[in-house]
Amino acid sequence: MDLKLVFILILSYNGWRDTVECLESLQRLNYPNYRIVVIDNGSTDGSMDRTKAWAAGELPVESKFFAYDPSIKPVRWIEYDRATTEAGGLPELEAEIEVLPPNRRMVLIQTGANLGYAGGNNVGIKYSLARGANYVWLLNNDTVMEPTAVCEMVRMMESKPQAGCVGAKLIYYDWPDTLQVAGSHFCFWSGLAFARGYRKKDTNDWNEPYMPGYLSGAALLCRRAVFEQVGFLDESFFMYAEDIDWSIRVKKANWEIWYCPQARVWHKDSATAGSKSPFMEYWMTRSNLRLVRRYHPYRLPVATFFQVLRAVRRLATGNFRRSLAVIRGIWAGIGLKL
């Protein structure tokens, strides 16, 4: 297999414990041609300092998926601000780490603000393309992957020239034999997303590649040519549904998207936003209705009705703050100018 260059983008926001476990996991990849890029999206918890401490070998990582290995430290890092990153970095700094193995070097990016999922990743995507990436892997920081994950996704890409994006099999971190996502579908009538295989046992039933409605952005490999043709992620979503919008745009440009079951990634559900928090409820409702309004506006009244039902259910179970967040998300989703 031709060893195409893969840039791995890890977007981090106030989650250094997750980030360093993810980085430790990446050090065990068996694919020899990759670059690690950590994008700090305006963290306020000292995430970047903790990441540097991990790189120096001063912060051992505990994980149920692997044993900490001090022999693969230190990791040499270089650091950029947003403007320098988007310009492709500095040749003299890049030369300092170019001679090192891929698991012993990384690039740290400070965006200077919370740009959201799309905004933060777009900074890294622009850098990756400027540095000659063939593929870009968008990876949530709250993930741990099998050492073969990148190799399997690249193999699928290379075997399917029309594949623009490939998504990994996502498995619950806390239930390592239980599926989280094996490809997904978005219903424009209800404004709700549905994950195939959700909370099912990870058996051979989920091991066939196929083309889903959309791919989760938690572990998404994209071809360089797709960014060059389609553009970048839509930053107006800020949180949630960016991956759905991206999948739609990729397919409209006549690329295929594929689920790759051989690439297994364990994901901590909603570790950044807080599982089922009002924050999550607001942004998910807002973004999903915005998506409906953009692609199927005639379905918006029906989708809005389903979102109102969600708010009523939360209120009926005593979750007043979550119910209010859904209502606020509805208002924002149907009232935004596209």
Image (tube, rainbow, N blue to C red):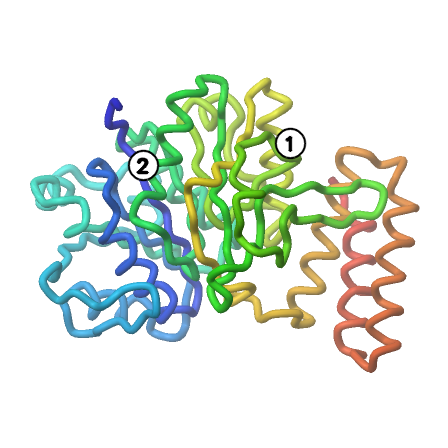
Image location (x, y in percent) of residue 103? 18, 50
Please give the residue where the numbered disc 2 appears in the rendered image: 151
Q: Earlier in the sequence, mark 2 or mark 1?
A: 2
Please give the residue where the numbered disc 1 appears in the rendered image: 248
Image location (x, y in percent) of residue 313? 86, 69
Q: Quadrant of the N terminus?
A: top left
Front of the two marks 2 and 1: 2
Q: Residues within 10 Å of mark 1 (few under 14, many from 20)?
A: some
- Does residue 34 lie above or below 277 as drawn? above
The structure residue drawn at horizontal position 23% and vertical position 52%, both measured from the top left corner, is 28
The residue sitting at the bottom extreme is 318
Image location (x, y in percent) of residue 329? 76, 60
Q: Quadrant of the C terminus?
A: top right
The structure residue drawn at horizontal position 13% and vertical position 55%, both measured from the top left corner, is 76
Of the pair 185 and 276, the residue shown nearer to us = 185
Corner quadrant of residue 89: top left
The three-letter code of the residue at mark 2 reads Cys
- Please, what secondary structure does the residue beneath circle 1 have? helix
